[in-house]
Amino acid sequence: MINAPLLDKTNTGNGKEQSGFGIRGTINAGTAGVDWGRSLLGTLAAMMAVVPGVEAQTLPETAVWGEPTCAVQTRERQEKDRWRRAALGDRGAATIYRGWVLRHRQSLERCRQNTWPQVQGVWLRVYPNDWQPGVLEDVLDRIVNRGYNRVFVEVFYDGRVLLPVAKNPTPWRSVLAEAVQAGQVPAEADLWARTVRLARERGLSVYGWSFALNFGYSYGERADRQGVLARNGRGETTVVRSRLDPQQAREGRSFYLELSELEHLFVDPYNPQGRADLTTAVREFLKARPDGMVFDYVRYSRTGVGTDGRRRLIEDLWIFGAASRAVWRSRPNATAWDTVVEHAYQGVVDFVAAVSRPVEQQGVPIGTVFFPEGNRRGLDWVDGRVQPWDRFPAKWERHPMTYALCKDGQCVADQVGEVLRQSTPKTLVCPVLAGTWGQSFRGHASFEQRMRLIREQHPQVRCVSHFVYAWMEPESDRRRKAGLHRGDE
């Protein structure tokens, strides 16, 4: 059985659990499909084992429609889908289907212009199965049907890039690598570019969603990149407590295993090679001409943090990489606690500024994804994530993961208010809500309930996004991950 996303969890320090981005999945040995549909090779199944001690989280049992705004009516959804399936082998049907797509694009644009929020986004991971004719069209149609006009597509995560195997100049493997090996996807297949094109045809703006300082477990296997890795004062890397068997995870196979924060390999933000590697990937992502780029994991690892989520010892900070130390030692009062924290903060800010420079040069919007409480600090402590989101330029979009858990959703509205308080009026703040429509899920109140509170208490917010597509359309996600979805069904 294929298990569903595992969320990157943290504690806010006030007893509320938050979940961050970085969804993972797993597959039990002996199954025919591969985790997230990243490869359809049954021969790989034996190496796909669950990491002991890591609990998988399940998807909702069924999809609940709820009350999304600007949604397509049931009859029209069904009619469009009928013509989508017929279009695969019939030119006449394809023309009719394109007409439905255009009609729904126009109605979506009119509705969102006059309906709060003006921008409503959803976070999406695509799989090799989506290359098959009609499959990606189905996914994007479902997104439009629910009234979304923006999609955030994951392009770099868990040590893989959403780039063609034949055109991948980065140090990371392509998401499509194993599917290409199996002959199921051509080496030239550009799933990212296709997603951008098909989404735009439907009136969706498209943002690339990229990890930043989390380079993926497989990056640490490279002998020529050991100096790039973040280290603490004991010389340890952020995977020092990893529960993976190195032999089981070698050569990129960690991509298919159940991962936690302990298996996330973070890099030294001051290292020029690390900056250059991610900048290369960003330049490639920009070739698809997305409408924006957002960077996730703009923080340090939480590995080794105390039960209160705070760090108090200099040696516990991930600032002892060679490049970081060289800059740190040049600072006045280098050993003072405030100086050390400022140095750690500046590394994150400078890193994101460096890797996003090609985005800025093209005039494409830049955004960061962060925990609202990640920038907290006291006289002798700092939040374990050391995430200085309030220091990013005001012109960058802010996508706070407002994931606090409470029955009525008020705690989420409070988080949104705190981010607004620390942001200038000209900064676009687009809260991210985890959960689904029409029902509570894993402690998160329904989208309807939380969005109503945000609109009432913070009417200046014009953009909201929802994590994640898989929780709204669980059957679609299950079949695509397993490589079983066909465009004619």
Image (tube, rainbow, N blue to C red):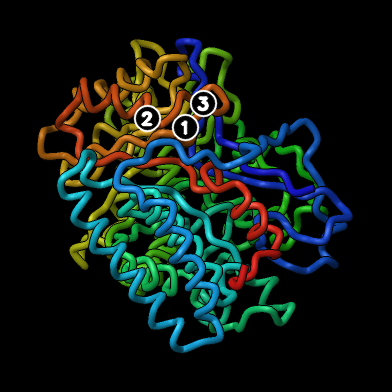
Depicted 236 relative to depicted 457: above or below? below
Is 81 situated left or right of 216 in this image?
Answer: left
Q: Where is residue 192 in the image (x, y as percent from the top left)?
A: 45, 69
> 267 and 135: which one is in front?
135
Q: What element carries label 3?
A: loop
Say which amino acid is labelled 2: Glu
Residue 324, picture quadrant? top left
Q: Residue 440 — which label?
A: 3
Percent of width and height locating residue 453: 29, 22
Does the CB distance between marks 1 and 2 fall below 8 Å? yes
- 345 sits left or right of 177 in the view: left
Residue 27, horizontal then vertical, whole percent: 77, 50
Mark 1: secondary structure: loop
* 359 horizontally vs 217: left or right: left
- Element under label 2? helix
Residues at marks 1 and 3, CA–CA distance in whole angstroms:
7 Å
Residue pictured at 49% horizontal, 76% vertical: 190
* Count of marks placed on residues: 3
- Please tell me which residue is depicted at 66% across the width and 62% down the height of the picture: 38
Residue 132 visible: yes
Mark 3 Cα shell of 10 Å, populated few (<14), some (14-19), many (≥20): some
Viewer-nearest of discs 1 and 3? 1
Q: Which amino acid does label 1 sit on?
A: Gly
Residue type, numbered disc 3:
Ser
Q: Mark 2 points at which residue?
A: 448
> Nearest the camera: 172 or 451?
451
Quick one: label 1 or label 2, which is nearer the N terminus?
1
Q: Is residue 184 above or below residue 412?
A: below
From the viewer's perspective, tell me whether residue 403 is left or right of residue 103. Answer: right
